[in-house]
Amino acid sequence: MSITAKVHIEHDYLSLAPTLRALDSVKIRVITQGTTDPGTTYFPFLIEYDDAEALEATLAEDGTVEAFELIDRTDDTAIYYIEHTPQTRLISSIVTDENGFLVHTETKDNGWLVNLLLPNRAALNTIWEYAIANDIALDIIEIYSNDDAGGESSYGLTDEQRAALQLAFSEGYFNEPRDISLGEVADRMGLSSTATSGRLRRGMRNLIAATIAERDRSD
């Protein structure tokens, strides 16, 4: 069952992260291409910034940029081909390894907002584990099942987070006063209190990010 996932990733050495930190109003988008090389570090980018000289000076100092080539410029929008340095953190290779596609990738805050098309949830879990192993902060914002005619969203929750939240809610953990302690929730899940607390906290964070926070930003 294929899924579409929207995730946000951050790391100091993600592609062009130093440029994002240096130029407040810069907007960058990866231009989708049909590359057949999963290990490529050479990508086309559409960059919006009104000072071309400052942009190129910043790219030249960016530790994730090995080389760049201007392809076209119109007013404050330019297309560059950028080759990354070996230390640059990328998720494109693991996405390709999992038979997935980066449908849309654009900068947001100090990281990247990425829309992924993946064959199943197992592929997303593999990408999540890859991010953890490479110290990449990855927040799942939304997950949609492409085979679900209703387009129901999981609101950014992993299966484990959903199970933890459902158990905690049904047993009265969120009641005031609480009907069950964190330790009791942990015992029923067969986890430590620390692991259960982290799972609940991450689940609530992703749930808020996919509902209240998303609506606030769009308003």
Image (tube, rainbow, N blue to C red):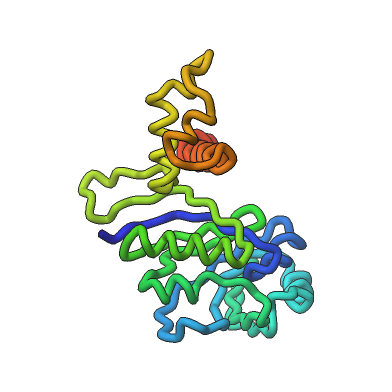
Give the residue furthest to the top: 177
Residue 135, quarter of picture: bottom right
Residue 201 seen by the camera: no
Residue 89 seen by the camera: yes
Q: Is residue 39 left or right of residue 89?
A: left
Instruction: Give the image location of residue 125, x and y in percent.
Output: 43, 60
| Rendered residue at 40%/80% (across/down) | 34
Rendered view: 215 above or below 69: above
| Rendered residue at 58%/83% (across/down) | 71
In the image, 179 versus 99, the foreground residue is: 179
Instruction: Give the image location of residue 168, x and y in percent.
Output: 44, 29
Instruction: Give the image location of residue 25, x and y in percent.
Output: 69, 56
Image quarter in which the N terminus is found: bottom left
Residue 163, quarter of picture: top left
Q: Is residue 167 left or right of residue 49?
A: left
Rendered view: 16 above or below 216: below
